[in-house]
Image (cartoon, grey):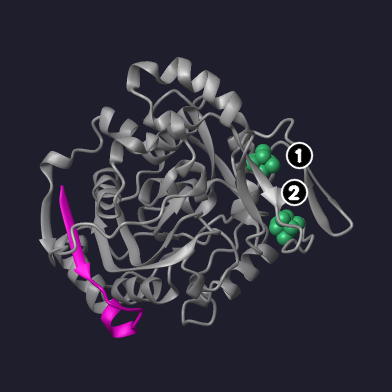
């Protein structure tokens, strides 16, 4: 596996374009593309937030990829993402505007087709098929463009987790409800990744998000972009770069066990990652997860007890809550009510997926333990 690394100090248009050129040259991307191909760029637009919040893929990096593609004769390009919340044209318009990809010279590439359809899975965990948004189903070549973040539920979000955004709108919380256990949810993500199988993953790690990602964390300067055709091994490598042991992240461990990620067979090209590690703060949900620190053979019995005693729940800061209802809209268990312009949660039925925290624009939801 070839891992391309380019020191990318800031979100400057020429600097980013130069980085894209170097990555694509290293990986010989021009050899794989033909003018008649439909190329789909899959960014991370998890919610409608400005690029400065470091929760979404930066529009200038996307623009650099589009420029490179156009200069290489590729004109059938679509930028497609199903963010959290509804998958409607109105919501997409808002996402594109706030994430600043609209008005950046790519408007005609932004997807407004809100259709989706079944795609057969390659493995057997998720009952044989996924419902996937149309542009991804129709793509000849997918460029996966995640943002480097820590994540309240999965611990880490990069190439593999970014693919979850091919599931239309509110079907994502339903999938959380169907697979509430992190092991099952991660198996589903791995199967979805194998089904979508992006040809290239280019990571926006100029600025990432640490702590309570994917939306409620803090901006963390990192200063690099990464690219590889093998997103599994790349995710493991980048996890190490931010101080996370890949095997501590269930989906990365599953990828290694499935033979998809192999850290022993990496050829590094481009700039040296001289820092070795730039540690990211881990999410509150993981910081409090004692089960992870229990020896392997005790995890099952310990996990059963710990899960009951130490299960984490969302907690609303009523001073910050503005009663927008996005948490209620995204809750797969339907246990959030908006009363008097404030969100009210019940513990009963909560599956600790933290979709509510992910969608809260006010950072009003934190994590607390039953004990
Ligand atoms: S908790 Fe956040 S998402 Fe929920 S209603 Fe309040 S502000 Fe909106
Ligand atoms: S309240 Fe929040 S954490 Fe609990 S099930 Fe609903 S979205 Fe998930």
Pick the quarter of the image with the C terminus. Answer: top right
Q: Looking at the image, which is closer to me, 180 or 167?
A: 180
Q: Secondary structure at mark 2?
A: helix
Q: Which residue is mark 2?
A: 328
Magenta segment, which residues?
Answer: 1-16
Residue at the image position 55 percent from the left and 59 percent from the top: 216
Question: Cβ(mark 2) to ligand 1 < 8 Å?
Answer: yes
In the displayed structure, 234 sits above or below 61; it is above
Q: Which residue is mark 1?
A: 334
Residue at the image position 47 percent from the left and 77 percent from the top: 106
In the displayed structure, 252 sits above or below 73; it is above
Residue 345 percent coordinates (x, y)? 76, 43
Residue at the image position 39 percent from the left and 17 percent from the top: 298
Q: Secondary structure at mark 1?
A: loop
Alpha carbon of mark 1 to alpha carbon of mark 2: how far? 7 Å
Residue 25 percent coordinates (x, y)? 16, 67
| Left or right for 1, reference 348 | left
In the displayed structure, 258 sits above or below 335; it is above
Question: Cβ(mark 1) to ligand 2 < 8 Å?
Answer: yes
């Amino acid at each position: 596996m070839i891992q391309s690394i380019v020191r990318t100090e800031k979100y400057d248009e020429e600097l980013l374009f130069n980085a894209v050129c170097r990555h694509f040259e290293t990986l010989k991307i021009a050899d794989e593309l033909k003018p008649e191909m439909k190329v789909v760029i899959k960014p991370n637009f998890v919610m409608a937030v400005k690029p400065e919040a470091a929760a979404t893929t930066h529009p200038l990096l996307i623009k650099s990829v589009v420029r490179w593609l156009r200069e290489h004769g590729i004109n059938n390009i679509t930028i497609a993402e199903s963010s959290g919340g509804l998958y409607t044209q109105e919501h997409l318009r808002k996402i594109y505007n706030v994430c600043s990809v609209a008005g950046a010279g790519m408007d005609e590439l932004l997807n407004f087709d809100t259709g989706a359809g079944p795609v057969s899975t390659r493995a057997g965990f998720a009952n044989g098929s996924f419902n996937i948004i149309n542009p991804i189903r129709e793509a000849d070549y997918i460029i996966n463009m995640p943002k480097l973040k820590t994540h309240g539920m999965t611990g880490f979000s990069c190439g593999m987790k970014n693919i979850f955004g091919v599931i239309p709108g509110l079907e994502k919380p339903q999938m959380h409800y169907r697979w509430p256990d992190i092991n099952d949810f991660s198996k589903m993500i791995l199967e979805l990744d194998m089904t979508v199988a992006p040809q290239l993953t280019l990571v926006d790690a100029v600025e990432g998000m640490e702590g309570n990602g994917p939306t409620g964390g803090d901006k963390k300067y990192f200063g690099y972009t990464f690219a590889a055709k093998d997103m599994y091994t790349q995710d493991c490598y980048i996890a190490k770069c931010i101080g996370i042991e890949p095997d501590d992240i269930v989906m990365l461990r599953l990828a290694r066990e499935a033979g998809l990620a192999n850290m022993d067979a990496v050829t590094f090209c481009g700039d040296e990652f001289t820092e070795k590690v730039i540690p990211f703060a881990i999410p509150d949900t993981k910081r409090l997860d004692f089960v992870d620190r229990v020896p392997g053979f005790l995890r099952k019995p310990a996990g059963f007890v710990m899960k009951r005693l130490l299960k984490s729940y969302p907690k609303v800061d009523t001073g910050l809550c503005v009663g927008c209802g996005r948490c209620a809209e995204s809750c797969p268990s339907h246990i959030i009510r908006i009363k008097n312009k404030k969100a009210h949660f019940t513990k009963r039925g909560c599956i600790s997926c933290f979709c509510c925290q992910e969608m809260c624009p006010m950072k009003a939801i934190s994590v607390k333990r039953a004990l």
